[in-house]
Image (cartoon, rainbow, N blue to C red):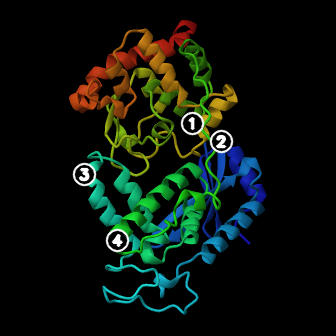
Amino acid sequence: MGNLSPAEITKAIGSGTDQTLSDGASLSLKIRGGSALWIYKFRDGVSFRSTSLGSYHHGMSLSAARNARNAFAAKRYEHRIPRRGLAVINSADAPVEPVKSDARPSAQGATGKRMRFADVVESFITLKSSEWKVKSSEPRNYRRLKDGRLGKMWTDEITHTDVETELRTRWGDALANADKMRVRIGLVISHAVAKGARADGPNPARKEIIGQLIPAAPKTVHRPAMNHGDVPAFMAELVTDKSAAARALAFAILTVARNAEARLSDWSEIVGNAWIIPGGREERSMKEGEEHAVPLSPAALALLGPRKSSGLTFGEMHKSALNDKLGALRSGLTVHGFRTSFTSWAKADGYPKDLRELAKAHAAGRTATDAAYERYDRDDQLKALRPMLQAWSDYVMGTLVSAS
C-alpha cells in the first residue's frame, strides 16, 4: 500500500495550494494551478526520468495510478537490458561478453570493425555536422538515441523488433516524434552499412515494416486562428481568470511566444523588462536553436507577479494546460494560432516582414532577403522589437483600458 488516501488528495486539491504529494515507490501527485497530475520517476541508466500517468481530474484515481505505475514498471522490466551479453539481447544463444576483436565473423555479413549503435551515432553526427546550422538541434536529437536500448547494442544485430521497442518505450506517447526518430535511426543504420559495421540489406527502421507495428501520427488538422480583431475582447476575459494557465496564455499572446516557451519560462530568464529565451537548453531552448530576446511591456510584466530569483514563472503545469484553458474559453483554436493573429495585425499596421519574423523567432529570418538574425544581437533585437510589441500590447489590452 502507498502513503496517500483519497481523503488526503481531496483536501490537498481543495486547499488551492501548489504542492507535491508522495505515495511512495516513486509515485507522486503534482498539484499545480488547479491541475493534479500523477508522476512516476524511474531510473534509466545513470539518469532519472519521469513520466506522466494521467490527470486525477480525468479518471486517474489513486488506485488507478498505482496500477498504471506497476504496469509501466513491469513493462520496463520486461524490456530491460541485462548487464552481460548486451550484443546478443535478441539471440537465442546464452549471453556472453562482446567479442573484443575488431575483426570477427558476423552472422549478418559485416566486413569492417564492429561498432555499437551509440558509436555509429557519433560517427554520423561528425559526418553531417557541416551540413547542419551552427546551433542546430539535430546533434542533440541524434544523441538522444544513445541513451536508449539501441545505444548499447551492436549495430549489426539490430532488428525491426528492436526498433519497434525503442520507439514504443521512449516515444510511443508522441507518434509524430516517434516517426522522426524512426527516420533518424534508419539514417544511422545506413551509415553503419557504409562504414562496414553492418551488412547491406533491408533497413530494420524502414517505414513499410515499422508502419505495421506502430500507428502513424494523425494528420495535422490546421485550426483557424483567432481574428486579430477579436483578440482584445478575449484578453479582457482571459486576464480576469487569474489562474496560472490563463496568465501563461496571456503572456504567450503578448510576447508572440510558442506554447512551451511561455509555459516553461523561468525567472532566471527575466532580465529587467526583457525575457531572454535561451538557445541551448534541452527543454526550454528556442525551437530554432538561437537565443531570442523579447522586450516585455508593462502588461506582460504584470502577468508574471512578484519577481523571484529562479523557478518556473507560472509554476509547473501539464504540457496541454494552455490549450486546455483556451479550449474551455474558445473551442476549435490553438495557442500557436495567436502567432498568426499577431502576424495579421502587424501586417495590417505596416510592420515589415523581417521584423514580424524576428518577433516570432523564425528561422525564415535567416534567408537572404530576411536576414533578421544576421543583423540583430540581443540589444538590437530588444531595441528593434520594443515599439512593435508595445503597440501590440496596447492593442490587445485596449478593451481593458477602455473599461477601466
Q: CA distance from mark 4 to mark 1?
A: 44 Å
Q: CA distance from mark 3 to mark 2?
A: 47 Å
Q: Earlier in the sequence, mark 3 or mark 1?
A: 3
Tags 3 and 1 touching, CB below 8 Å: no
Q: Pointer 2 and pointer 1: residues touching (CB < 8 Å)?
A: yes
Please give the residue where the numbered disc 4 appears in the rendered image: 119
Q: Which residue is mark 2?
A: 34
| Nearer-N-terminus badge (4/1) | 4
Mark 3 and mark 1: Cα distance apart in space: 42 Å
Q: Name the N-terminal-most of marks 3 and 2.
A: 2
Describe residue 349's horizontal placement relative to residue 231 as left or right.
left
Q: Nearer the viewer, residue 44 or 206?
A: 206
**Does residue 340 appear left or right of residue 318 in this picture?**
left
Label 2 and label 1: CA atoms lie apart by 8 Å
Point 72% across, 45% down: residue: 14
Provide the residue designation for mark 3.
130
Task: Give the residue at mark 1.
Answer: 244
| Residue 102 shows in this picture | yes
In the rendered image, residue 66, in percent from the top left (x then y), is placed at 72, 65
User: Quick check: 99 above or below 354?
Assistant: below
Classify 187 as above or below 333.
Answer: below
